[in-house]
Image (cartoon, rainbow, N blue to C red):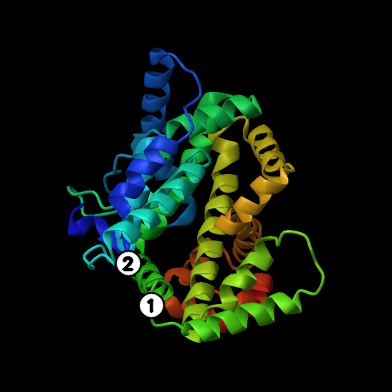
Amino acid sequence: MSESDVGSGVDFGFAATVGGWLARPAPAMTDYTRRQVVEELHTSARAAEPLVREVTGLGDDGPVPDARVIDRRQWIAAAAESMRVMMGGSEQPAGFLSSRLTGAQTGAVLAFVSSAILGQYDPFCVDSTTGAGQLLLVYPNVVAVERQLQVTPADFRLWVCLHEVTHRVQFTVNRWLTGYMAEALAVLTSSSGPDLNQVVGRLADHLRGRGDDSEAPGPSGILGLVRAVQSEEQRTALDQLLMLGTLLEGHADHVMDAVGPLAVPSVETIRSRFEERRQRSQPPLQRLVRALLGLDAKLSQYTRGKAFVDAVVERVGMDRFNAVWSGPQTLPLPAEIEEPQKWIDRVL
């Protein structure tokens, strides 16, 4: 274990190893199918970029970066490296055994998530040749979902790429977003929060306030537990990240719908079946794990964020909406996500 593998007492190299061991096997496919889906995802990502630039008004006619089309284990390794960068990988470990233990726990979480990620733009997973973040597309998961939904593979792959390429455009055009995220994450992962007695006291007060509710807490309940043990500075940073995530996801969903009818012939079928899959009931244990990881809260971000972007673009147009990317001061506040006119009045 090298010093560079460790950040905040977590052995991220070991996390990647454990996550690789625990990752679920990919859906069965022939070598021909594997090569075909990998090639088509590369092509779809390149095709999506000019469509996204045109609809959003962001970017120019510059070259389109290549995507990385990877499997689940490769995604786990990339995610562990990204977490190491975000959490300050040059710090000294808290101890060999403790860093290995937290590394194993982190790897188990990454293994669970690795079968659900279709793709993502990771601004912290930097390409050594370009110095920019990377667009990651997890081809086994794309194949698994398109089979489950019984949709046209070519259409579904382009549809997925439209969403993820929008994130790449958001970050590459607005370079300040990466630093803004990094600063908020640094606050969240700092050890300068309340002492143990304060944490226990806040947590006990929060749990007593729940009364006799014996059901597992949902996303809002889990978020409440997290907030209960945070300092005021950390709660502010968490709110900043939640609002930014809501905007980014909602904007990407808006772009998917704006581009979809022209570029994806079966977009209505894909959207309806995908939304049905999002809302499908799950076993209690899986619901609890998803809530603990914040995955269900992420689904709420899609809905609330898209409603905000839809409303603002309808009222003022995309060019004026793009003022939202001017800097941290023009990002929507929590109240403005629910009432877009308040953001229009304040910013425009």
Relative to 195, is 269 on the left or the right? right
In the image shown, does 322 or 179 lie closer to the viewer?
179
Crowdedness near tag 2: few (<14), some (14–19) or many (≥20) residues, C-alpha within 10 Å: many
Look at label 2 and name its amino acid.
Answer: Ser
Task: Tell me if label 1 and label 2 are in contact, CB under 8 Å.
Answer: yes
Residue 155: x, y in percent?
Answer: 54, 29
The image shows residue 308 at horizontal and vertical percentages of 63, 65
- Tell me the quarter of the image containing the C terminus: bottom right
Q: Position of residue 278 (x, y in %)?
A: 67, 44
Q: Residue at x 72, y 40 (%)?
A: 276
**Kind of residue indicated by mark 1:** Ser
**SS state under label 2:** loop
Q: Which residue is mark 2?
A: 8
**Regarding mark 1 in the picture, which secondary structure is present there?**
loop
Residue 329 is left or right of residue 60, and the answer is: right
Horizontally, residue 22 falls left or right of residue 338, namely left
Percent from the top left, x then y, of residue 301? Answer: 60, 60
Q: Is residue 311 visible?
A: no
Instruction: Decide: is 209 above or below 12.
Output: below
Q: Residue 191's mark?
A: 1
Residue 226 disc label = none
